[in-house]
């Protein structure tokens, strides 16, 4: 049974816990890694770009916690197995899994090549990769008998269709990830493992490696226009705001929360 909280000090106490953050070398993943680290969590970053990971590790270590990066392509089962096994040994177990890795696309389905390679690549990473990570970490959490928290980073696109943004594979993968979250919450409940999802809207990742779409001269950015018109905050979200939500969902304060998809998009989905 998951313990009760008895005071507010312990409600958000994550000191000494360990977390895997996939795609933690940039964007929302790095924001979450830094937020957890600031709360005393040791961080294992799993990613493909190890040069970029070196910078991320130094930023996370600045909070006085252990941080190490591991090369991992979450679409390859054996690679995932080996990486998780190594992290488990190096950190003496894992308390929190943040499934953040993902890729996007921008094309109509009927404009894809006949083999639908873009479709399979996005589904393979954004949904199947999440499942593979959950399998490897989840079974170790189960066998360790100490419970745990899994937080899947999905998207508000999993619950809506954006006009003018051609991301059908991405949206379908995120919708699947949302329901995977609910199913796994039930499947893992008996082991005191909670499973929730964060569904961000437009987020300022402040990452030069992931530029915003280029627009023809003289035209405004339609994404920025939509944000201005349909978000209550009239701005994009921040990676730290996603990180703060991940900290809450990973903390004892959220002991009674599982199987939830928490949208963080300033009401954009509601007003679309």
Image: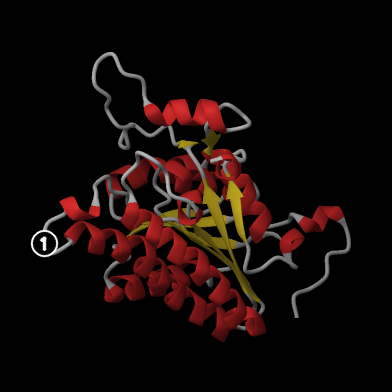
Give me the residue at 74% from left, 67% from top.
255
Q: In the displayed structure, does residue 78 sit left or right of residue 177? A: left
Disc 1 on helix, strand or loop?
loop
- The answer to which of 1 and 84 lies nearer the viewer is 1
Residue at image point 47% right, 45% down: 28
Q: Is residue 77 visible?
A: yes
**How many discs appear?**
1
Please name the colour scheme applied to the rendered image. secondary structure
**What quarter of the picture does the N terminus occupy?**
bottom right
Task: Please indicate, yes or no, whether residue 15 appears anywhere in the rendered image.
Answer: no
Between residue 75 and residue 119, name the one nearer to us.
Answer: 119
Give the vertical position of 132 relative to 13 (above or below). below
Which residue is more in the foreground, 46 or 259?
A: 259
Q: What is the x, y in percent for residue 215?
A: 27, 24
Is 194 located above or below residue 98 in the figure? below
Image position of 249 (left or right of 58): right
Q: Residue furthest top?
A: 218
Q: Badge 1, how many Cα within 10 Å: few under 14, some, many 20+?
A: few
Above or below residue 65? Residue 216 is above
Residue at image location 40% in from the left, 43% down from the top: 26
Measured as percent of width and height from the top left, residue 66 is found at 52, 54
Name the quadrant containing residue 174: bottom left
Residue 43 drawn at (x, y percent): 51, 56
Toward which corner of the image does residue 101 lie, by quadrant?
Answer: bottom left
User: Foreground residue, 228 or 191?
Assistant: 228
The residue pinned by badge 1 equals 114
Residue 127 point in image, percent of width and height: 38, 65
Q: Work out which residue is located at the far left of the displayed protein and give it.
A: 114
């Amino acid at each position: 049974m998951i313990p009760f909280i008895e005071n507010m000090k312990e409600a958000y106490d994550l000191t000494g816990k360990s977390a895997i953050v996939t795609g933690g070398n940039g964007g929302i993943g790095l924001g979450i890694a830094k937020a957890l680290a600031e709360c005393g969590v040791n961080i294992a970053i799993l990613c493909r770009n190890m040069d970029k990971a070196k910078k991320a590790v130094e930023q996370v270590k600045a909070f006085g916690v252990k941080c190490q990066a591991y090369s991992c392509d979450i679409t390859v089962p054996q690679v995932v197995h080996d990486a998780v096994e190594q992290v488990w040994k190096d950190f003496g177990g894992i308390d929190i899994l943040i499934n953040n890795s993902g890729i996007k696309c921008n094309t109509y389905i009927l404009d894809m090549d006949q083999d639908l390679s873009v479709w399979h690549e996005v589904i393979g990473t954004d949904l199947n990769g999440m499942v593979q990570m959950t399998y490897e970490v989840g079974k170790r959490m189960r066998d360790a008998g100490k419970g745990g928290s899994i937080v899947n980073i999905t998207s508000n696109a999993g619950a809506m269709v954006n006009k003018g943004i051609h991301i059908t594979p991405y949206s379908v993968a995120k919708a699947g990830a949302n329901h995977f979250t609910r199913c796994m919450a039930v499947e893992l409940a008996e082991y005191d493992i909670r499973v929730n999802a964060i569904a961000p809207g437009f987020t300022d990742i402040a990452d030069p490696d992931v530029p915003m779409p280029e627009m023809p001269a003289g035209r405004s950015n339609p994404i920025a226009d939509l944000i201005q018109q349909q978000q209550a905050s009239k701005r994009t979200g921040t990676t730290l705001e996603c990180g703060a939500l991940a900290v809450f969902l990973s903390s004892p304060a959220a002991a009674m929360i599982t199987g939830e998809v928490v949208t963080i998009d300033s009401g954009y989905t509601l007003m679309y």
